[in-house]
Amino acid sequence: MKIVVSDLSVHYGDKQVLDDINLEIDHGLWTCLVGPNGAGKTTFLKVLLGMASYAGSIQDHGREIFRDHSRNVAFVPQQPQIPQGMNVAEYVSLGRAKIDGFGKESSKSREYIYTILQHTKLLGMQHNLMTHLSGGEMQRALIARALVQEPELILLDEPTSALDLHHQISVLNDLEVLKEKGVTIISTMHDITLAAMYADRIIVMQHGKILLSGTADQVIHSSELRTAFENRIDVYTLDSGRPVIVASKEIHSREEE
Amino acid sequence: MVRSDSVARIWDWKITATCFAVLVLVALIAVSFGPVSIHFPRILRTLFDISGGATDQERTVILQLRLPRIILGALVGAALATSGAVYQTVFHNPLADPYLLGAASGAGLGATIALTSTHHNVYGLLPIFSFMGGVLAVLTSFFISGKFFAEPNSLLLSGIAVGSFATAVQTYLQQRHTDQLRPVYSWILGDLTSASWDVVLWSALYIGIALVILFSVAKQLDGLMLSDEEAFSLGVNPNTLRILAVAAATLATATAVSASGLIGFVGIVVPHLVKGLTHRVTNRSLVSVALVGAAFLVIADLGARTLLSPAELPIGVITAFVGAPFFLIVLRSRRKVATS
């Protein structure tokens, strides 16, 4: 199955945020949106949720997604709204609201929330207030809340940007396990090296357009990637064959010339 | 955690039942005390029409003076406390209350316009005028703050500005209509002395509608504690829910203001008190918030009637006396969380 995006455009007032996007996204894979700030990645993610309005068409399982509450999609925002006075268990269990209804909790849900808390290493701190969590714990709680939804598709906006390298890897490994269980993942990511390590498909965006899309290998070694970042990146290949993308320092390259 | 534990700490009927019992007890005490004291058994006998009740004179005191006043106080307290809790949830701000958003001042201006523009008895129309004033003030606050719901703090600041402006216009109107100054002024200070069965009836109607709406969406308000995208993914339409909740809370506030004048701080004190006692986010115990709000205002009014007896203190003075220090405590504990 695929999510089919055709002639998609989004305007905020006069500003065109997404411009004539045509694309297919495979279910069961991890697709990563990369590109400079302001490229329209977050907007694209929100549109894929079905909440923001758009021109054109996005079809998931053959149905237009706008305001379609029957889809089971979870969203992990970059800047979360942290509920005052809620503890971790309460926060995470909110994810069951669509299944059980708000203010209700089935015994099956209770079991499932427990399993997810354990899996995301939040067990033991489930009675801590959300406002007292560290950055890494917070990100785990956000993802845990999305996971208890048992989503078919999970959208994550910069899931690793607030984390140190150790926590980045741990979050990404968890998502990889999730993908192996059949969940479709679409995320935005600043770090192209990490994106190349984990994602099956990479979509490079710039100025609201899709510059290129393909497998990680295809995208990393293409010249369009450099164009997207105005030739300010260098791609190296490690002995293991893994690509590493770093910012290039213009002054150095001029001296070498 | 034991696996059978409820993880979500959802609604608990025992807490609500306790709050209801407290309200009934407080109401009985309030009927009993005053310039004329009447014993509990006689009040109960009178209310349930059993022989051996109060004398005719006491009956008049109970049924025409004290009872409508206590019921009105309970309605106003429930309205202010519930809408305070809802504003706090919707605007993600523990210090939001009907007064800080300009809703109450706007409602006050609406009511003043109604009182000063005619010499006829306009009490039945006061809720409509003050509702329009309240809604207008809240809408103005929204537009000045720029983005709907996006910037809770700038919304509160513009609410304060709009509130001050409404109060200024209201003062101007009072001074222009000095013949009407006294009723307007005593109404502004907040009192329940105007309570009659008429006022109780129309207040109960509007506040009842507002509270039914708020109680029915209370659980879904959980969704508004998350980001809009997360709320949507859980089946909530965040903007529709917000508009409904704010409209209902504004109707409750406006009715309370038109029935009893400006009684401050109930909307902050009570939700935080209930939160502290139940350890639940307030929208999960909204019925308890309403019951405690009702009890709080009935006690405050008992104080207003009896502290300087036979003279009366404005009830707003009592709620501010308790509420202002409480507000500072909440502010301080919040700053501690923010800096830790």
Image: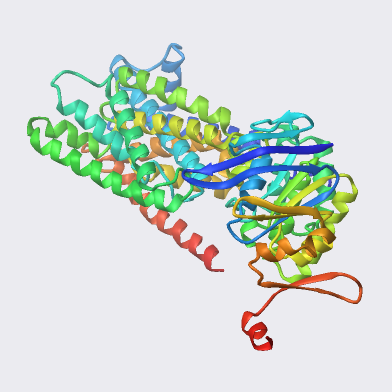
Q: In terms of image quadrants, where is residue A121?
A: bottom right
Q: Is residue B218 left or right of residue B202?
A: right
The N terminus of chain A is located in which quarter? top right
Residue A113 drawn above or below residue A139: above
Residue B63 percent location from the top left of the image? 34, 18
**Is residue B224 visible in the rendered structure shown here?**
yes
The C terminus of chain A is located in which quarter? bottom right
**Is residue B1 visible in the rendered structure shown here?**
no
Q: For this rendering, which residue is in front, A87 or A247? A: A247
Residue A128 percent location from the top left of the image? 68, 58
The colour scheme applied to this rendered structure is: rainbow
Q: For this rendering, which residue is in front, A41 or B26? A: A41
Residue at image x 19%, y 44%? B168
Residue B134 drawn above or below residue A82: above
> Which residue is outermost to the front?
A257
- Looking at the rendered structure, the number of numbered marks drawn on it comes to 0
Residue A135 drawn above or below residue B235: below
Residue at image x 28%, y 19%? B124
> Which residue is outermost to the bottom?
A255
Residue A108 percent location from the top left of the image? 84, 37
Residue B83 percent location from the top left of the image? 45, 37
Residue at image x 18%, y 37%? B185
Q: In terms of image quadrants, where is residue B9?
A: top right
Q: In terms of image quadrants, where is residue A233?
A: bottom right
Residue at image x 90%, y 71%? A241
Q: Is residue B294 left or right of residue A252?
A: left
Q: For this rendering, which residue is in front, B19 or A145? A: A145
Q: Is residue A64 left or right of residue B154?
A: right
